[in-house]
Image (tube, rainbow, N blue to C red):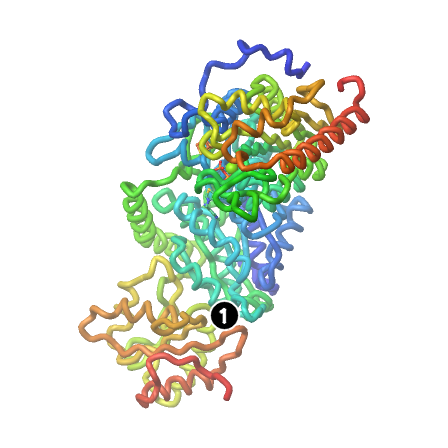
Amino acid sequence: MNDANVYAVKSLTKKEYLAPGHRSCLGCGEVLAVRLVHKALGRNTITASATGCMEIVSSPFPLTSWEIPWIHVAFENAAAVAGGIEAALKVLERKGKIAPKDIHVVAMAGDGGTADIGLQALSGAMERGHKFLYVCYDNEAYMNTGVQRSSATPFGAHTTTSPAGEIVPGQITWKKNMPEIAVAHNIPYVATASPSYPLDLVNKIKKGAEAEGPAYVHILSVCPTGWGVGSEETIKIGRLAVQTGFFPLYEVENGRYRITVDCEELEPLERYLQPQRRFRHLTKEMIDFIRQRVLEQWEELKRRAGQTDPVAG
Amino acid sequence: MKKRVGMEVSFAAAEAIKLCNVDVIAAYPITPQTHIVERLSEYVANGELDAEFVPVESEHSAMSLCVGSQATGARSFTCTSSQGLALMSEIVYITASLRLPVVMMLANRSLSGPLSIWNDHSDVMSVRDCGWIQLFVRNSQEIFDHAFISYKIAEDHNVLLPLIINFDGFILSHMFEPVELVEDSIIKQYLPPYDPKYVLHPDRALTMGAFAMPAVYTETKKAQDEALRQSYPYILKAWQDWGDLTGRYYHPVEESYTEDADTIFVALGSFAETTGEAVKTMREQGHKVGLLNLRLWRPFPFEAFSRAVKNARNLIVLDRAISYGGPGGPVASEIRSALYNLENRPQVYSFISGLGGRDVTVQDYIDMFEKAISGKAPQDEIFGVRG
Ligand SMILES: Cc1ncc(C[n+]2csc(CCOP(=O)(O)OP(=O)(O)O)c2C)c(N)n1
Ligand code: SF4
Ligand SMILES: [Mg+2]
């Protein structure tokens, strides 16, 4: 029953757990994702946040946007803090010190806090099997500190530490495949998501929160400021990332792959790359190079999804 | 009936932590702390202690996990040494500013490099200003007692600060010593279950760890400093109450032969035991020497300290760490500034010794004493350096 189609827009709660009035940039795709995630989770949630844009925009002391219990400790340890919350709830319930309750324990971090500096803490927490949901809000760079590259920055992108220069054409490494790293931990649920597909996202968060063990959801979050797109373009760019095959939406449930938003025919990659300032220096050769990788990865994903679950496709 | 048993000091420490009925233990192996957490994991595996034992992938995560669990209302414990402390130190500072009463045992060991697994105080001195209550214990009984005393202090709603119990690696951690166990009924009476003031729970939307703009940062830091200073009477009270129940009383500075002493040694940790032997020997030889054991390091017991040394002419401060390029050993330079405003302040001699497991003998202390009173000692000296 847990299918994207059963969640109509109307079924989303009107309650905001991330109150408006926070300080994100106009059109921020990341904060939109955070908002949707917490709507999906509901009030029985405790969230541990890493340092980054989302922490800064939501918690300038003495103000807070959070309508749920929320803790920020440091940049690289959200998964470990969440592990502590989960361990505490477990033992306190067992010892009868708190009443039993189904509480979602959630860790949130950016791509830097996840794929780079926080990877060790995350790997440890997944391997130990804490029952928690880790959400990576991937805007493909260290935005909070001024758009520096991370290992999740895509090939070719200009950032302030992978500048497009005369000799080096921006980021020269391929985007680290975090969802696959999560899958390699044999955890029950891994998914990619996008706020441009809100029902798909909500569905995946709910599934992740219900999983019997660690769950990992990786959300591509358009950042108009860092990517150089208009603040009104966020949703469209997010859709194009999916429709061009650049960022496919899929889930891996107990090892079974399923593409959740299928694209019979991929849109031309240029439609995604060309509106973004961070890619504007790319030559035709470079775009072709990227296209080839995107297609290979898309075929590989389809192979995995088809091979293991041909019906759901 | 008081029961005395002989056991490795680390096991006595683990036994006490078990009796504290901790809820969450997060730990990572590092010599010489490891025996404590190994023993604790056995207790959990055998059902002798109902706790979550989380074998984290690093000390950074050990402290982070304790922050999460303590913030959720669980009595939390970790234990480390040296590089482990250095790795977790980022979170050590944050734990104090979040006012989370985590208790940590620190088996003091030197910091790399060169790598050395042996004992000195360079690890603890590197987090001098982390905002935790910090105290030193000298023997098995003291570490056993301080498990209970520490949670009692840290969790007091007038305190709510984390606490480090320092004890010397190997010199103490791996010794076999007698310890007088404490009856359950006394522990129950002394240490109530943890009653957290603020918890992460869906019953109440609470934001912990908000960031501070310049307009409020100074105020939060002042408040934190005041909290640490104001913990002092509650520390004294916790010691007093423990003494009333067990007959063992502890004090922020502990003195022997100081009343009429011209020269007073100041020591931290188990080196005070050997220094005490040296002082006894020198007393027998007719020298007016005394010993002051600084048990409480943070908050620094200024008043008790000044009172104890006010009649002395010389202080020989024994440091076990270097402040590279700085004004003598870290303890000595702090004591100098603590005494600076006194009218009749004693001369302070800083001797740095016992680095990286180097033994310091009774004769060494006698040599330091003779050097100091002969007026030949420099203000600061790394003692016992071989030619
Ligand atoms: C140990 C440590 N190193 C560096 C920083 C500085 N820092 C804070 S946020 C941040 C970037 C965050 O990037 P990401 O995780 O991708 O989140 P975003 O801001 O992009 O949402 C950096 C480098 C820090 N706070 N702590
Ligand atoms: S920099 Fe990007 S991610 Fe950060 S708040 Fe602005 S739009 Fe959002
Ligand atoms: Mg980012």
Q: Is residue A81 visible?
A: no
Question: Relative to A13, does residue B189 appear above or below in the rendering?
Answer: below
Q: Residue furthest left?
A: B343
Could you tell me which quadrant the N terminus of chain B lies in? bottom right
Q: Which residue is under mark 1?
A: B120
Q: Is residue B329 left or right of residue A211?
A: left
| Residue occupying the point 41% across, 58% down | B134
B178 and A99: which one is in front? A99
Q: Position of residue B320 (x, y in %)?
A: 45, 72
B206 and B157: which one is in front? B206
Q: Is residue A145 left or right of residue A156?
A: left
| Residue occupying the point 53% across, 70% down | B119
Q: Secondary structure at mark 1?
A: loop
Q: Position of residue B127 (x, y in %)?
A: 43, 59
Q: Position of residue A280 (x, y in %)?
A: 53, 34
Q: Position of residue B184 (x, y in %)?
A: 53, 48
Q: Is residue B79 visible?
A: yes
Question: Relative to A247, does residue B42 appear above or below in the rendering?
Answer: below
Give the image quarter of residue B330: bottom left
Question: Which chain is home to disc 1?
Answer: B
Q: Is residue B108 left or right of residue A300?
A: left
Q: Is mark 1 within 8 Å of ligand 1?
A: no
Mark 1, Cα crowd under 10 Å, few <14 / some 14-19 / many 20+, is: many
Give the image quarter of residue A22: top left
Residue type of the residue flagged with mark 1: Asp
**Picture quarter with ligand 2:** top left
B7 and A171: which one is in front? A171
Badge count: 1
Give the image quarter of residue B351: bottom left
